[in-house]
Amino acid sequence: MKHSILLWIFIHYALIAFAQGPPITTDTPVMLGLNGNGIRTFGKFIAKENANIYIQPIGIPYNISTTFQLGGIFPLKFITPNNTETTGGLADITLFAKYQLYKKDGTAKTFRILATARQSFPTGNTHSLPAIGSGLYQTYLGLIIGQISSKIGIYGDFGYNVTSHNVTDNVSYNFSVGTPLLPQQYPQKQVNIFLEFNGNYVIDPKVHTLFVSPGLQFILGRRVLFETSFQLPVLQQNITINQTKYMFLLGTRFLIN
């Protein structure tokens, strides 16, 4: 009887996570469902003044346990400068880990804090023109926080990124509010809307960027969701050339088990 109750509680909160859906451009503190053992990929189009960039990352997270997750991100990147041919290939590969530091569950709600670490490797080609890779090792340490209920999800992540070769470090921060538009049902079928903010601050020279990112997400059953986000610049401090005009994201997440 005790095991049946625990199983029901586990399924109950897993369904809440599915119905709410993970944020699109902000990291999520939930390691169940579509952010568990699965695959995430999306196409991201970046329109700049002097070039267009297309990035297609493939993210593969794997839950070692309910509190510990490992994974990798393998991005393809294509750059098309104005009036020039496209250059593309594999960009810098990233390995990541997440560990749940704190969790408090209530009736139809949960609050969670995770620590996260990412390590990027200079696997992208730096000899092409323009370069596909950064040529840098980068180590990111951060926190992910989320307050999630069946009616609203509030998420935030922030962290510090250390770069090699005496290149300046940077701080990133993201914030998201999401809410489902349809009543909860099983099998899962949901439409979620998000309003997100994505910021980055380079320490020296000081460069600060901030984007507002409205998004839409469709959950179709237990194993798959589709999502899209449109990012517009709010702040591009001290960027005088080749500013970003907008970014568009369209992707999917697929649960393996």
Image (cartoon, rainbow, N blue to C red):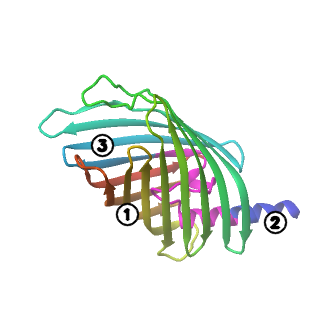
User: Measured from the top left, where is residue 120 in percent x and y?
Assistant: 50, 34
Please identify, in this view, whether the residue under mark 1 or under mark 3 is nearer the observer: 1
Q: Provide the residue span drawn in magenta.
A: 12-40
Residues packed near mark 2 inside 10 Å, few (<14), some (14 to 19) or many (20 plus): few
Does residue 113 sit above or below 115 in this rendering?
A: below
Name the kind of residue labelled 2 in the image.
Answer: Ile
User: Measured from the top left, where is residue 223 in percent x and y?
Assistant: 54, 54
Q: Which residue is mark 2?
A: 5
Distance from the alpha carbon under mark 2 to that under mark 1: 42 Å
Name the kind of residue labelled 3 in the image.
Answer: Tyr
Count of picture labels = 3
Q: Are marks 2 and 3 in contact (CB under 8 Å)?
A: no
Q: Residue at x 37, y 59 (%)?
A: 211
Q: Which residue is mark 1?
A: 212
Name the kind of residue labelled 1 in the image.
Answer: Val
Q: Residue furthest top?
A: 127
Distance from the alpha carbon under mark 1 to that under mark 3: 19 Å
**Of the residues under marks 1 and 3, which one precedes in the sequence?**
3
Q: Which residue is mark 3?
A: 54
User: Measured from the top left, where is residue 23 in percent x and y?
Assistant: 50, 60
Q: Are marks 1 and 3 in contact (CB under 8 Å)?
A: no
212 left or right of 3 in image: left
Residues packed near mark 1 inside 10 Å, few (<14), some (14 to 19) or many (20 plus): many
Does residue 159 sit above or below 19 in this rendering?
A: above
